[in-house]
């Protein structure tokens, strides 16, 4: 691709049973409809094995993820990676993808979220010697789900990384868990909604480079999603 094009690498997660639509370019100017220069979409299973790579017409404004991946999910979760190219002469701002998902047949409202833009890297190349990136998420005082978890994915092509997941509870208690992720691997790390009677207050994910991270909340009975939101970068 042309060296004049800028790159944007983003990721989300797909599960069967949901309508899942991605807005490829969030248009800010009604007078000028901007388009990406190129877009490839790939899907990866939890172990980091490639499932499918599909070129997408960059002139599209939306992408129906369920329509293109339903035959590949096989009952498991997939990490969906968007490798975009855009021309800075056309975009005065960095384009960003947004997502919309809704459980088919559910009376629950749809979930609208910003797709996680992942600024990855290979530690050996950037000389990282310690934790240099963390994401955080603060929970509402009133819980919206019975079960919480963090979805975390490693978009690196070559490097295995260790993610540290810290949960903080009202009163100051902190719990820690570590998860090792190979290239393109991903995992769902369960979070305790309460600990010793104290409510979950926030969660942090720390790693050597930026990962794809989302906080999810589910019904305890059927596991249906009630919350799907990307985490926020505080330091890198």
Image (cartoon, helix red, strand yellow):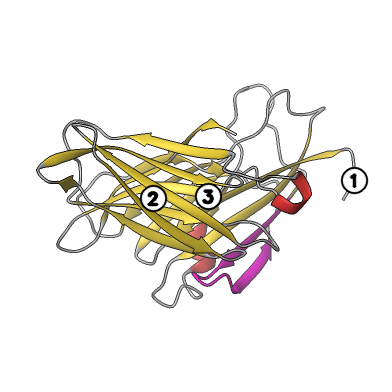
Q: CA distance from mark 3 to mark 2?
A: 18 Å
Residue 20: quadrant of the picture = bottom left
The mark nearer the N terminus, 3 or 2, is 2
Q: Nearer the viewer, mark 3 or mark 1?
A: 3
Q: Mark 2 — residue?
A: 101
Residue 130 in the image: x percent, y percent? 60, 44
Write down the region rendered in magenta: 39-55
Q: Nearer the viewer, mark 1 or mark 2?
A: 1
Residue 151 in the image: x percent, y percent? 42, 54
Image quadrant containing the C terminus: top right
Q: Is residue 14 visible?
A: no
* Main secondary structure type of the part rendered in magenta: strand
**Residue toward you, 84 or 177:** 177
Image point 54% across, 65% down: which residue?
Answer: 185
Q: Mark 1 — residue?
A: 2
Residue 186 in the image: x percent, y percent? 49, 62
Is residue 65 depicted above or below 115 in this figure? Answer: below
Image point 52% across, 61% down: which residue?
Answer: 79
Residue 53: quadrant of the picture = bottom right
In the image: residue 5, left or right of residue 56: right
Q: CA distance from mark 3 to mark 1?
A: 26 Å
Is residue 180 depicted above or below 165 in this figure? Answer: below
**Residue toward you, 159 or 101:** 159
CB atoms at circles 1 and 2 under 8 Å apart? no
**Badge 3: how crowded within 10 Å, few (<14), some, or many (20+)?**
many
Disc number for residue 212:
3
SS state under label 2: strand
Q: CA distance from mark 1 to mark 2?
A: 34 Å
SS state under label 1: loop
In the image: residue 174, left or right of residue 36: left
Image point 52% across, 71% down: which residue?
Answer: 45
């Amino acid at each position: 691709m042309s060296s004049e094009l800028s790159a944007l690498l983003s990721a989300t997660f797909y599960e069967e049973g949901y309508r899942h639509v991605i807005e490829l370019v969030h248009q800010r100017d009604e007078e000028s409809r901007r388009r990406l220069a190129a877009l490839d979409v790939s899907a990866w299973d939890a172990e980091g094995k490639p499932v499918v790579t599909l070129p997408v017409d960059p002139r599209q404004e939306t992408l129906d993820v369920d329509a293109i991946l339903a035959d590949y999910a096989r009952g498991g979760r997939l990490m969906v990676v968007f490798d975009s190219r855009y021309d800075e002469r056309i975009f005065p701002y960095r384009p960003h993808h947004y997502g919309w998902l809704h459980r088919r047949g559910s009376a629950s409202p749809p979930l609208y979220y910003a797709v996680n833009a992942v600024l990855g890297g290979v530690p050996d190349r950037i000389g990282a010697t310690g934790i240099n990136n963390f994401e955080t998420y603060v929970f509402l005082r009133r819980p919206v789900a019975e079960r919480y978890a963090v979805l975390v994915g490693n978009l690196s092509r070559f490097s295995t990384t260790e993610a540290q997941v810290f949960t903080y509870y009202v009163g100051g208690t902190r719990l820690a868990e570590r998860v090792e992720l190979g290239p393109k691997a991903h995992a769902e790390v369960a979070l305790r909604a309460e600990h010793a009677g104290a409510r979950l207050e926030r969660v942090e994910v720390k790693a050597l480079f930026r990962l794809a991270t989302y906080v999810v909340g589910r019904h305890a009975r059927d596991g249906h999603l009630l919350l799907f939101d990307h985490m926020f970068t505080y330091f890198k």
